[in-house]
Amino acid sequence: MSAMFHLTGLSGNELYCLHLKQLRPQGLYVGNSVQSLGLLRGMRAAFSGIVGGEVDDVTRIIHEGRAAAFERLVNEARAEGVSGLVGVSSDLRSLTGNTEFLFMGSGVHAQNSTAFFSSAGGAQELYCHMDAGYAPLAHAFGNIAYSVGVGGGLLGNLKTLVRGEIREFSDVFNVTRHQALERLVAQARDAGANAVVGIRTHVLRFAGVHEMYMVGTAAHQPALPRSNSATIVTSDLTGEELWGLSRMGYAPLKLLISTSVYSLGAIGGLVAAFRGLSKGEIPELTQLVYDAREEVFNRLNSEAKALGADSVVGIKTYVVELGSNLIEIFAVGTAIQKVSGITTATDTLPAQAIIRDRDTWVEGDLSFDASTLRAGEA
């Protein structure tokens, strides 16, 4: 058998990108943990949901399950002498009423001696990060399980009689989203990072509540300003975006999050219902949704100015119907700033770092639902 034989979840384009950074594939690794929510904790979690906000028990259960699975993944890779894990991805799967926490990653071997690292991004994104000077340290994640709650719901229902923002709901959503980010940053700080790049956000359902799960790659960029040890740069820019901005001399400052919960109002709801029977614009709802977006943009703008940012880029907005004539307007973007010394190692990105691989598994009628998780690209 050839000494170069290996299993990997990495694609041909990813392997080429690793080759350019003197990394070669070395195995496919898995870590898992099957856990039960438990009757007592389930009852406590249900009780906690009454008052709204974070449901501590559920947050802890999910975090502990993920932490156990991730630790096993890392231990398995280290035992094989792997230099790092690329494209670490995670999943939650239901097994006979219990939950399996699963992590997978593709191992790599560095030609030059380096400390063990793990990366949330696939090899193409990793190439962009490394070429922009962001050396990977650790796959990092933060989460929070939350509920608007019966208490908050009763108060909110009273306020749905009029149109406009429901500040109590907005506060719950803003606090929970920022707490997940703060926990992600705390993990990165423990790893000795000064940046978390490639952040991805997921909102899941678990044990009757919502969970916000944020994951990214904790990294170190020596050219970033050393304002204080507590400062950790955060960014949800793609690898290509980060590379491009770095080439122009810009560095991310902070991932900005803003959300507002608005009531369409009882009167507005009735008007909308009647006008929905015929074609044409509904001015009341047009103006309300416009105002809601402006509100979240104003909050992003205020926070960016307070940071001294030059711009906020990659802004994405979402509108979610929460029921009972309530909508949530959610906006996220990365504040950036021109920083001396920020640049890239190469003048251009190779095509292999940009072109995404196409799936060659063509799904057909197999009489079952196939669920896949590729250990390479997160």
Image (cartoon, grey):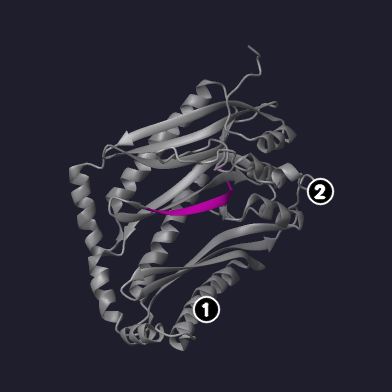
**Which mark, residue 347?**
2
Count neighbours of disc 2 (C-alpha within 10 A) and say few if under 14, some if 14 to 19, many if 20 or more: few
Query: Residue 156 in the image: x percent, y percent?
Result: 29, 75
Span colored in magenta: 192-204
Residue located at (66% from left, 37% from top): 14
Q: Secondary structure at mark 2?
A: loop
Which one is earlier in the sequence, the residue at label 1 or at label 2?
Answer: 1
Query: Residue 160 in the image: x percent, y percent?
Result: 31, 80
**Which mark, residue 294?**
1
In the rendered image, the residue lying farthest to the top is 1
Count of numbered circles in the view: 2
Query: Residue 252 in the image: x percent, y percent?
Result: 63, 58
* Residue 366, image quadrant: top left
Quadrant including the C terminus: top right
Residue located at (52% from left, 25% from top): 78
Which of the pair 248/282 is nearer the observer?
A: 282
> Chief secondary structure of the magenta span?
strand
